[in-house]
Image (cartoon, helix red, strand yellow):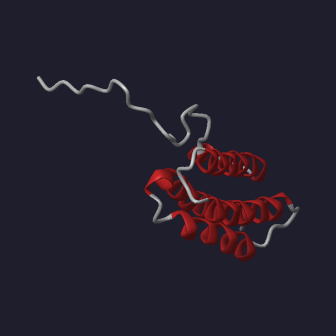
Amino acid sequence: MTVFDQRGQRVQYQFNAAGDINISAVQSKDELTRELEKLKVEVERAKDSNAIDADLAVEAEYHLLQATKEARKEKPQTSFFLEHINSAKGLLDNVAAVAGIATSLAKVAEIASAIFN
């Protein structure tokens, strides 16, 4: 049996530690906007814990904000929404600490395409 000694270790950042983000359960625009807001908070948490560069995080937060604003519209423009989601995802793709956020954004794009059309 292998034993790992974890004394003295600190977790810097853990994506969705509370487990309250569930992109797969999204069925409507309202649910989508709520989950996007949660993802934006996760980016902020990662920035605050220094798991992600502050400038990169701010730019990703901007794209998430723009996507959320578009999703709230009565008739969202799918292309505009996806442009911002993909921009945020592109920024976060190569940052291991926030890989879960990038994966979630890919799922957001898939679900939004179905909801908006």
Q: Position of residue 39 (x, y in %)?
A: 65, 49
Q: Position of residue 61 (x, y in %)?
A: 70, 59
Q: Position of residue 109 (x, y in %)?
A: 61, 64
Along the line of sight, which residue is nearer the eye, 78 or 92?
92
Q: For residue 107, what is the image quadrant? A: bottom right
At horizontal 38% and vertical 31% (from top left) the residue drawn is 9
User: In the rendered image of this protein, does residue 47 appear above or below residue 81?
Assistant: above
User: In the rendered image of this protein, does residue 20 appear above or below residue 75?
Assistant: above
The answer to whether residue 108 is left or right of residue 95 is right
The answer to whether residue 31 is left or right of residue 1 is right
Along the line of sight, which residue is nearer the eye, 78 or 7?
7
Q: For residue 21, what is the image quadrant? A: top right
In the displayed image of the protein, which residue is found farthest to the front? 8
Query: Could you tell me how many numbered marks the image carries?
Result: 0
At horizontal 50% and vertical 56% (from top left) the residue drawn is 103
Q: Position of residue 105 (x, y in %)?
A: 58, 59
In the displayed image of the protein, which residue is found farthest to the left? 1
At horizontal 68% and vertical 66% (from top left) the residue drawn is 59
The answer to whether residue 4 is left or right of residue 70 is left
Q: Look at the image and tell me in which quarter the C terminus lies.
A: bottom right
User: In the rendered image of this protein, does residue 42 appear above or below residue 8?
Assistant: below
Along the line of sight, which residue is nearer the eye, 81 or 16?
16
Along the line of sight, which residue is nearer the eye, 53 or 14?
53
At horizontal 31% and vertical 27% (from top left) the residue drawn is 6
Q: Look at the image and tell me in which quarter the N terminus lies.
A: top left
